[in-house]
Amino acid sequence: METNNEHFQESKTEIKPKKSKTGLIILLVILGFILIGAGGYFFLDYKHRMATIENEKEYSQERLDAINGIFSVAEYDNIPENYREHIYDFLAHNSYLDGTYFLTKIADRAKSVYAFGDFTDDDNDEDDLAVLFENNDYTSSMLVIFNHKGEGLYIKNFENELPTINAFKVGAKIYENEAKLTPASCGGLMIKTDYRKEALVYNKKTKKFNSHYQYTEDDIKSMNEPEEYYDEGYEEESTEEVPEASIINSINQDSH
């Protein structure tokens, strides 16, 4: 015959599986909510990232179109993409994209408004870039030199002048500080206007760019010719002193 204690133990044993099953259900429900929440988070994050990528693509395309719009003739095709971006950023930063300054649209001139070279002798393998921007008055211009990072090194305005430029390397024969051809101490830029030619050279001692006038053949010829003096052919006035008595006699005669 079963005792009350044995009956109680059997009842206790039968209840345990029910508690364990209920706990499992609760755990599964909690895990389900966690998975749903995590899935929702990752889905929203994915949607956000995709939207960001699309916006970046649209911005990149707009920027690319704007950059390409600056280089309107084929003569600019030799300018690498990173230097194109430097030019665009300079115009944008200074609010020149409205056409205040621009790159010439004349194909024949375009090849002479930019030049690459080592203009500061900085001992790296990256070229600097010199660019002539034209003003919207179509008679003035601005020279800007960038390094390979897009940092500005030099700016000069030319009022009522539209020069052309080309680069020369260190050691090239130029007139520097005197009317005698000497090897350039640094790579530089030759600037030509209608009336003169100058060499722009960086001076490592003074830490700045200097312009040096480039003499023409006529200049050198004129300096080497002997100076000529011309006699005007006029007669000097007599400075002979007149005796005082003669002056008095002359006055007396006039009075009579």
Image: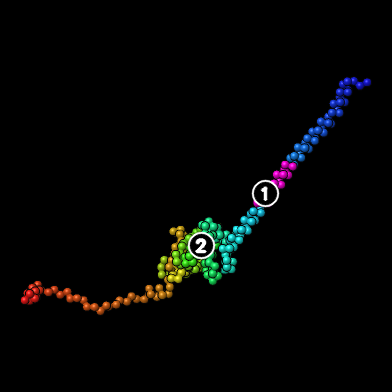
Q: Residue at x 50, y 59 (%)?
A: 153
Task: Identify whether 254 is placed above or below 210.
Answer: below
Q: Is residue 123 left or right of residue 25?
A: left
Q: Is residue 3 visible?
A: yes
Where is residue 215? Give x, y as percent. Answer: 42, 71
Q: Amino acid at mark 2?
A: Tyr
Classify residue 104 as left or right of residue 235: right
Residue that mark 2 sits on: 101
Q: Residues within 10 Å of mark 1 (few under 14, many from 20)?
A: few
Image quarter hosting the N terminus: top right
Magenta-colored span: 36-52
Residue 193 is tagged as none
Q: Inspect the image, locate mark 1, and give the three-letter code of the amino acid beneath it.
A: His
x, y percent for residue 90: 53, 58
**Dominant secondary structure (helix, strand or loop) of the stretch shown in magenta:** helix
Would residue 239 be found to the left or right of residue 103 on screen? left
> Relative to residue 226, is residue 89 drawn left or right?
right
Decide which of tag 2 and tag 1 comes sooner along the chain. Answer: 1
Quick one: quadrant of the C terminus? bottom left
Picture residue at 52% right of the left edge, 63% below the top: 102
Element at label 2: strand
Under tag 1, what secondary structure?
Answer: helix
Q: Residue 48 shows which numbered tag?
A: 1
Residue at x-position 48% and y-position 60%: 154
How far across and how far down the image is residue 231, in percent?
A: 27, 78
How many marks are shown on the rendered structure? 2
Magenta stretch containing residue 103, yes or no?
A: no
